[in-house]
Image (tube, coloured by chain):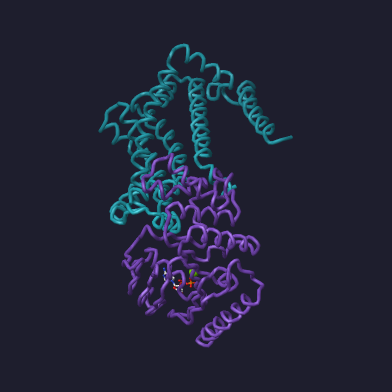
């Protein structure tokens, strides 16, 4: 049997077990509702309009937090990699902030921004910032000397041109690695922040479902999160392999 | 008139004195080959001339004018190909023009001319990983040629390709040189290469480097590597190089 077939078989077995085990009564269906109950909640939630509303709220948080993080992390990482002054100033701060789990910022975010999309956006921002920052910084530092020297002998005189034409494109593989890790961190922070009530969204729906003791609804929204996660990762990978076509021969 | 004059060049890396009071001239339109024991400072000389290591003592003139730092009259071909892996052949070749701000259409025209000149037509949209070693060096040469330098510095450019390709590249270089009348300084560790290409050949001593002997190469072009005068010259150069190497061995 080929790989694809095995992949699908694995999934089928997983969902079948999820379906059968609660039905046999081996576990309490109130704790683990069968798969069909969970999946059927999705059209029901769409019909009520709740799912779309939560999805749009979450996407807004994602765009604010993740987009903002990339806008800050990439330029800052490049500058840290290229300018000793900035590197030496920021490195200790970065090393001190990075180990703090982003979730720890939730109370701060809620006090600073209230129960608004900005609070969720801020938590996501913190979570997504460091992976991209660190990888961009590493990539920038790792640009080979020969590329830089080649550029100098071809007439590059100013730092801005060097960054635009050599440092940034040469660091792109590392930057992409960072962006994908940031993306995963962003979703984690998004759910955590929203569960605390920062701005609504899918996370808040999870908390509400718990209040209603509606397990099928919890699993429905979890399935939705899984799907979004896969979708964003696939999109990023597609884009990455297109932009990094030149690496095919190197990584292979 | 001499295209390049090196006067009293001295260079140290920490305690290591690599070049000490080195002087020589490169005549307008000649191919000057430099040979010498490995580690004697051949690359160091070229890097000083092209402005990659501006931290040296002594004076270097081009057309009677003192050089300091990057000079657009000088082009540099690295030992390893040093192509930008993220750019296709044509995008590599047009790099220098891009930096100068030449418009896109003109850039393409000039780059295609250079690509044709080095025999890479049809490969302009390939990425470096898709090219053989010889093709990479051709592309590197084209990338330097679009800047139309008067002097080409080449640091063991064919050292990494197989013997057969190497001979072809040497012939092509001679054709190109005869068409463009560029002045070339060519560093090599191959005496065969030096005698085939060089209008003159400089043999350097081991560190700290001095000129041991300068050979004029009277063999008319097109040269036949196996002709008696060629073989004679090779023998003479080799015997001087052997003396120099012998001295190195005695030291160590
Ligand atoms: N950046 C550097 N720092 C310290 N030593 C160097 C550096 N570059 C070259 N050297 C030393 O200088 C000597 C000459 O190097 P190089 O010019 O590359 O020799 P060649 O090209 O003749 O083989 C070598 O002993 C090398 O180790
Ligand atoms: Mg060398």
Q: Quadrant of ligand 1?
A: bottom left
- In the picture shown, does residue A177 fall above or below B76? above
Residue A106 appears in the figure: yes
Name, please, the residue furthest toward the front: B220
- Quarter of the picture holding the N terminus of chain B: bottom left
- Residue B24 shown left or right of residue B80 in the figure: left
Rendered location of residue A226, percent (x, y): 51, 29
Name, please, the residue furthest toward the top: A47
Q: Nearer the viewer, residue A40 or A92?
A: A92
- Residue A177 shown left or right of residue A108 in the figure: right
Q: Nearer the viewer, residue A74 or B188?
A: B188
Q: Residue at x 30, y 26 (%)?
A: A116
Rendered location of residue B222, percent (x, y): 60, 66
- In the picture shown, does residue A100 fall above or below A84? above
Rendered location of residue A117, percent (x, y): 32, 27
What hue does chain B carry in this figure?
A: purple
What hue does chain A carry in this figure?
A: cyan
């Amino acid at each position: 049997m080929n790989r694809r077939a095995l992949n699908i078989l694995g999934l089928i077995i997983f969902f079948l077990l999820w379906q059968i085990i609660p039905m046999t009564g081996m576990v309490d269906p109130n704790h683990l509702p069968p798969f069909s109950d969970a999946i059927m909640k999705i059209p029901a939630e769409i019909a009520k309009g709740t799912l779309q509303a939560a999805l749009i709220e979450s996407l807004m948080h994602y765009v604010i937090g993740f987009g903002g993080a990339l806008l800050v992390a990439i330029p800052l990482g490049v500058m840290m990699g290229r300018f000793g002054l900035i590197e030496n100033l920021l490195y200790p701060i970065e090393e001190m902030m990075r180990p703090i789990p982003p979730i720890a910022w939730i109370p701060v975010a809620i006090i600073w921004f209230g129960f608004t999309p900005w609070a969720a956006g801020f938590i996501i921002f913190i979570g997504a910032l460091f992976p991209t920052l660190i990888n961009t910084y590493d990539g920038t530092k790792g640009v080979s000397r020969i590329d830089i020297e080649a550029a100098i002998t071809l007439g590059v005189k100013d730092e801005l041109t060097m960054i635009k034409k050599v440092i940034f494109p040469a660091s792109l593989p590392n930057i992409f690695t960072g962006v994908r890790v940031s993306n995963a961190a962003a979703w984690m922070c998004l759910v955590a922040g929203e569960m605390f009530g920062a701005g609504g969204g899918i996370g808040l729906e999870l908390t509400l479902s718990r209040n209603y003791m509606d397990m099928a609804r919890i699993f429905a929204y979890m399935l939705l999160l899984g799907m979004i996660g896969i979708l964003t990762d696939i999109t990023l990978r597609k884009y990455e392999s297109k932009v990094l076509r030149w690496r095919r021969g190197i990584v292979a | 008139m001499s295209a390049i004059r090196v006067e009293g060049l001295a260079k140290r890396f920490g305690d290591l004195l690599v070049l000490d009071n080195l002087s020589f001239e490169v005549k307008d339109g000649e191919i000057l080959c430099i040979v010498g024991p490995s580690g004697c400072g051949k690359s160091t000389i070229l890097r000083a001339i092209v402005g990659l290591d501006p931290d040296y003592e002594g004076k270097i003139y081009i057309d009677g004018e003192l050089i300091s730092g990057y000079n657009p009259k000088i082009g540099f071909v690295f030992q390893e190909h040093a192509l930008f892996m993220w750019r296709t052949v044509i995008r590599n070749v047009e790099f220098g023009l891009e930096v100068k701000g030449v418009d896109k259409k003109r850039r393409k025209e000039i780059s295609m001319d250079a690509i044709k000149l080095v025999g890479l037509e049809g490969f302009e949209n390939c990425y470096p990983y898709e090219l053989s070693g010889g093709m990479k060096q051709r592309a590197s040469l084209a990338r330097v040629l679009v800047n139309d330098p008067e002097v080409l510095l080449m640091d063991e450019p064919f050292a990494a390709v197989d013997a057969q390709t190497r001979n072809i590249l040497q012939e092509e270089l001679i054709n190109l040189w005869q068409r463009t009348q560029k002045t070339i300084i060519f560093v090599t560790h191959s005496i065969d290469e030096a005698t085939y290409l060089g209008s003159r050949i400089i043999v350097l001593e081991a560190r700290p480097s001095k000129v041991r002997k300068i050979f004029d190469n009277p063999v008319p072009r097109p040269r036949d590597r196996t002709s008696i005068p060629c073989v004679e010259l090779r023998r003479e150069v080799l015997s001087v190089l052997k003396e120099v190497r012998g001295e190195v061995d005695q030291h160590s």
